[in-house]
Image (cartoon, rainbow, N blue to C red):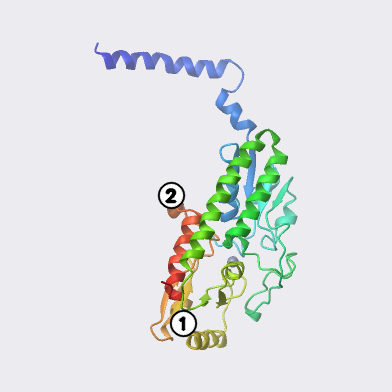
Amino acid sequence: MNQSRVALAAIATLIPLAMITTVYTGRPALQDREEQEKITVVASFYPLYEFASRVVGDRAEVSSLVPAGVEPHDWEPTAEDVSRGRAADVLVINGAGFERWADDMQAKVVANTSEGIEFNYREENEAGDDEQGHEDAGGGGVNPHIWLDPMLAKHQIDKIRDVMASSDPANTDYYNQNADRFTAELDSLDAFIRSELADCNKSDFIAFHDAFTHFSERYGLRQHSIHGVSPEGEILPQTIQQIIELANGFGINIIYSEDLIDSRLADTIANEIPNGKVLVLSPIEGIGNEEQAAGIRYIDKMKQNIANLKEGLECR
Ligand SMILES: [Zn+2]
């Protein structure tokens, strides 16, 4: 018998022993007990899922209600989703009217990550007839896309940290450290955006939907959009005509599309303007499984957006 055979024989003897130990001690193995003690966090949709995951690290199980790569605006929970939300120790939401279903879920603890943000304006639903917007959703008519402004994303991280610390005080230091680390990355992102957009010919751009309101306010840009506060719903021919005229008026040749929607409408408009071109400006409302598997996260998406914005705004 050579050495590797001896080793194999030893493993073959040990494996059944280990199994017997697990079965007959009458208590779950150590790893199982740790899993059971972990608190469960359910996040509403992608950015909240990533933000919550970053804060809780390996001390809680995080899952997302809206599946990867699904547009969350018109998403509605199934009965199974409602049970998941109710069973979770903490439900993390964006708030500001985005999750119209959140109150009905009756979660044990809700981390409303937009709570405490002072919105200094009221959203005007420019798109008018094409959708209902969020005005009737308890958001008080504010634009819900706060995560696209890294400084407001920091507020969201702080909220998650505070709720986690009160739900699971034993891990407070750990949650604080994780939150600090992510907050520092968001500060670097903010500095990166400021330097990338420091020297641009234009400040007007045409987004697919009204997702960059807070982002634009933060960085001194002017967002126009094809759709209103949600990327879904019908667009009237006169709206398309207005966008074409707007593009011509500002000398804009790039029309922004999104990663989770059909880009044909953006293509149609781009075809009607001189040197028209479509680029993606992601509202980061979802990241598909393939991109997630490739390690693409919120900050990567923000940097892709900045690269595409630089082209549209003619920055150096
Ligand atoms: Zn949106």
Name the residue rendered at 58%, 59% in the picture: 150
Q: Is residue 66 visible?
A: no
Q: Is residue 18 above or below residue 235?
A: above
Callout 2: helix, strand or loop? Answer: helix
Q: Is residue 45 above or below residue 61?
A: below
Q: Position of residue 88 (x, y in %)?
A: 67, 43
Name the residue rendered at 60%, 45% in the picture: 179
> What residue is pinned by disc 2?
293
Q: Position of residue 231 (x, y in %)?
A: 57, 71
Please tell me how crowded label 2 is: few (under 14), some (14-19), or many (20+) other residues with Cα within 10 Å: few
Q: Quadrant of ligand 1?
A: bottom right
Q: Position of residue 283 (x, y in %)?
A: 54, 64
Q: Position of residue 72 (x, y in %)?
A: 59, 61
Callout 1: helix, strand or loop? Answer: loop
Name the kind of residue labelled 1 in the image: Ile
* Left/right of residue 134 with respect to residue 246 in the rendered view: right
Q: Quadrant of the C terminus?
A: bottom left
**Badge number at residue 234:** none
Name the quadrant containing residue 291.
bottom left
Name the quadrant containing residue 6.
top left
Name the residue rendered at 57%, 55% in the picture: 47
2 and 1 marks in contact (CB < 8 Å): no
Task: Indicate yes or no: mark 1 CB to ligand 1 under 8 Å.
Answer: no
Find the residue positioned furthest to the left.
Answer: 2
* Left/right of residue 232 with respect to residue 9 in the rendered view: right
Please tell me how crowded label 1 is: few (under 14), some (14-19), or many (20+) other residues with Cα within 10 Å: many
Name the kind of residue labelled 2 in the image: Ala
**Badge number at residue 252:** 1
Q: Is residue 170 visible?
A: yes
Q: Earlier in the sequence, mark 2 or mark 1?
A: 1
Q: Is residue 188 above or below residue 173?
A: below
